[in-house]
Amino acid sequence: MVELIDPKIFENNLSKSRIKEIRIGNSNSKLIIIDDFFVHPEKVREYALSAKYAKESSAHDNPGYISRFPSDPGQFLHTCGYLKEVHFHDYRLHTIDLTPTYAFQCYDNIPTMPPHIDDVNYAGLVPLNTDEELSEFSGTAFFRHRGTGQEFTCTNSYRAEECLNKWDMSLWDRYHVQYHKFNQFIFYESCMFHSAYWDQERWSVDTPRLTFNTFTW
């Protein structure tokens, strides 16, 4: 039997949402926060819980499992394009040879990992665990390099690779955790040193850590 997915369950509330900016770190870097992002968050969560996930190799050794987004990503490309233009004043055009990525991520174990950057300009995520599951056990952490004081770098720069290939947490200070909230979109420049934060010892439910992730230019 063919499984049909109604793309309307992934509609978002951008046109009706209050968009909040917060500043973090010595660099005064910007995070964009949108509450109540999906129009039908329970249906999106239900889809994420029933989706099939696979382990994918990556430059940053992602500890989780990935399920590629099943629908037309046009609405999310529009959403991310709007945010980068209005809130980051970035008017660079998307080019056809750079494909944005949209996916669900599932974690059942996140070891302590040094921060990374993504090979895109912007990253975002929507937590799909309930607020009772999340509490302050899950978030996105941002880091400062102790030797240089850097909190961000140019994507794919030599300096980034030099720092990031040294898998030594003693080189980094975690200066901010943006704790997750159900159906809240967090959008930021992916050249900021960051990593998943998860207090696994305090996570008291069998539900895995679930997020919807965007990676765009």
Image (spheres, rainbow, N blue to C red):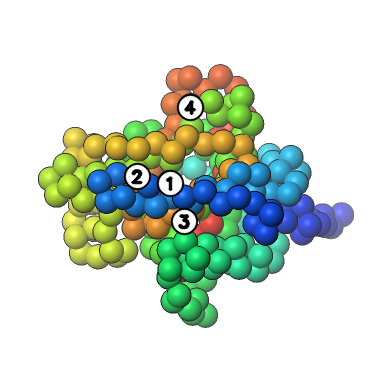
Mark pair 2, 4: CA separation? 20 Å
Task: Specify the amino acid type for callout 3.
Answer: Ala
Q: Which residue is pictured at 43% across the width and 54% down the height? A: 188
Q: Disc 4 residue type?
A: Phe
Q: Earlier in the sequence, mark 2 or mark 3?
A: 2
Q: Is residue 187 above or below residue 205?
A: below
Does dot 4 land on a helix, a strand or a loop?
A: loop
First reached walking from the N terminus: tag 4 or tag 1: 1
Residue corresponding to mark 2: 24
- Identify the residue at image location x=27%, y=51%: 27
Determine whether, in the image, residue 83 is placed left or right of residue 171. right
Q: Earlier in the sequence, mark 4 or mark 3?
A: 3
- Label 2 vs 4, first from the N-terminus: 2
Q: Secondary structure at mark 3?
A: strand
Element under disc 2:
strand
Q: Of callouts 3 and 1, which one flags the residue occurring earlier in the amino acid sequence?
A: 1
Quadrant location of the N terminus in the rendered image: bottom right
**Residues at marks 2 and 3, CA–CA distance in whole angstroms:** 16 Å
The percent position of residue 22, horizontal first and vertical second, equals 43, 46
Proximity of marks 3 and 1: CB atoms separated by less than 8 Å: no
Q: Secondary structure at mark 1?
A: strand
The x and y percentages for residue 200 are 46, 25
Residue holding disc 4: 137
Give residue 167's position: percent from left, percent from top: 24, 43
- The nearer-to-camera label among 2 and 3 is 2
Q: Which residue is mark 3?
A: 123
Q: Quadrant of residue 8?
A: bottom right
Q: Residues within 10 Å of mark 2 (few under 14, many from 20)?
A: some
Asked if 129 appears above or below 115 in the picture, the reply is: above
Q: Which residue is mark 1?
A: 22
